[in-house]
Amino acid sequence: QARLVESGGGSVQAGGSLSLSCVAPGYSYSRYCVGWFRRDPGKERETVARIGYDGGTIYGDSVEGRFTISRDNNKNTLYLQMNNLKPEDTGLYYCAAENTIWGRCYNGIRGNLDWGQGTQVTVSS
């Protein structure tokens, strides 16, 4: 059962923009590195972007410079602004939360992830 609640996504033409949001109700948000991942059937999970409680960010190579991740710690909410979208950005996007030391994001995933239900992003050429 998804513990995180996502919204946003949809369909857009290449070059367009979309935004995603993810709420984590009941979480001690300061303890979590949160992020967005893309998971498509038959493919490996891909890290899109992650952000720690301290605001430190990690971006996947394919999205850096086009996507911006942010979080509102007072609202337990994670955001992803996606600009200059490309057809290869198409996929199922999931938010996830990892309980980490000081809520920071570290290289690689070190613990269990709590997931959202996923939202589809479709970019047409």
Image: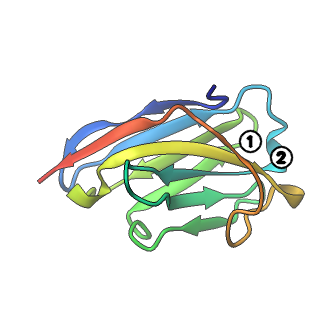
Say whether marks 2 and 1 touch (CB < 8 Å). Answer: yes
Q: Name the residue located 54 percent from the left edge and 60 percent from the top edge.
A: 49
Q: How far apart, in angstroms, are the residues tagged by discs 2 and 1?
A: 7 Å
Q: Mark 2 or mark 1: which comes first in sequence?
A: 2
From the viewer's perspective, is 62 left or right of 5? left
- Reading the image, the residue beneath label 1 is 73
- The location of residue 21, given as percent across then percent down, is 52, 36
In the displayed structure, 53 sits above or below 114; it is below
- Reading the image, the residue beneath label 2 is 30
Q: Quadrant of the C terminus?
A: bottom left
Say which element carries label 2: helix
- Outermost residue toward the left in this view: 125
- The location of residue 14, given as percent across then percent down, is 18, 54
In the displayed structure, 109 sits above or below 117; it is below
Q: Nearer the viewer, residue 76 or 98?
A: 98
Q: Amino acid at mark 2?
A: Ser
